[in-house]
Amino acid sequence: AVPYKIAGKISEKPHWPLPHKAVSHPRTASPFTATIAYYVREKRMFSLNEMFRRASLLPARLMESVAPGMRDKGRIRPGADADIIVFDPETVAGQASYEDTTKPARGMANVLVGGQFVIRDGKLITAARPGRPIRGATR
């Protein structure tokens, strides 16, 4: 669970999505959409393909040696368990701020994790729980 505050008290109890009055860090709500908006669209520092490589394939490759399940992440190919996002690159953006830390991103049409929708037609499906942990070998 991500620690957050409600009415000045820290809560470890998992809530999904975080309550509107929760105080967390803005990156809890929309880090990748904010990164796409800023570095790809506004600053033009990276192409969209490069941003996805940095956000998916590179972390997966970094973890492969300790968690072999990561070999099927960050890639779209037969047999891989890639998660799929459908969004408008012209409007996707993070909206969370220090004043409103739980404000959801905009521009996300559909997100599938393990083949199950977690966002469908722009609406969060709060009952969806398709993710599963990937663990490495204990030493």
Image (tube, rainbow, N blue to C red):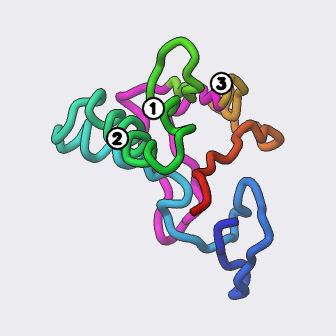
Residue 80 pos. (x, y %): 55, 22
The tag earlier along the polypeptide, 2 or 1, is 2
Front residue of 32/88: it is: 32
Q: Quadrant of the C terminus?
A: bottom right
Q: Nearer the viewer, mark 3 or mark 1?
A: 1
Label 1 belongs to which residue? 74
Residue 61 pos. (x, y %): 38, 40
Identify the amino acid type marked 2: Leu
Where disc 3 sits, the SS reads loop
Question: For the magenta stretch, what is the residue range?
Answer: 87-113
Residue 11 pos. (x, y %): 74, 78
Q: CA distance from mark 3 to mark 1?
A: 23 Å
User: What residue appears at the point 52 percent right and 23 percent down from the top-left corner?
Assistant: 86
Image vertical order of residue 134 relative to residue 84, above or below? below
The tag earlier along the polypeptide, 3 or 1, is 1
Give the number of the disc on residue 121.
3
Label 2 belongs to which residue? 58
Residue 73 pos. (x, y %): 50, 33
Is 99 magenta? The answer is yes
Is 70 magenta? The answer is no
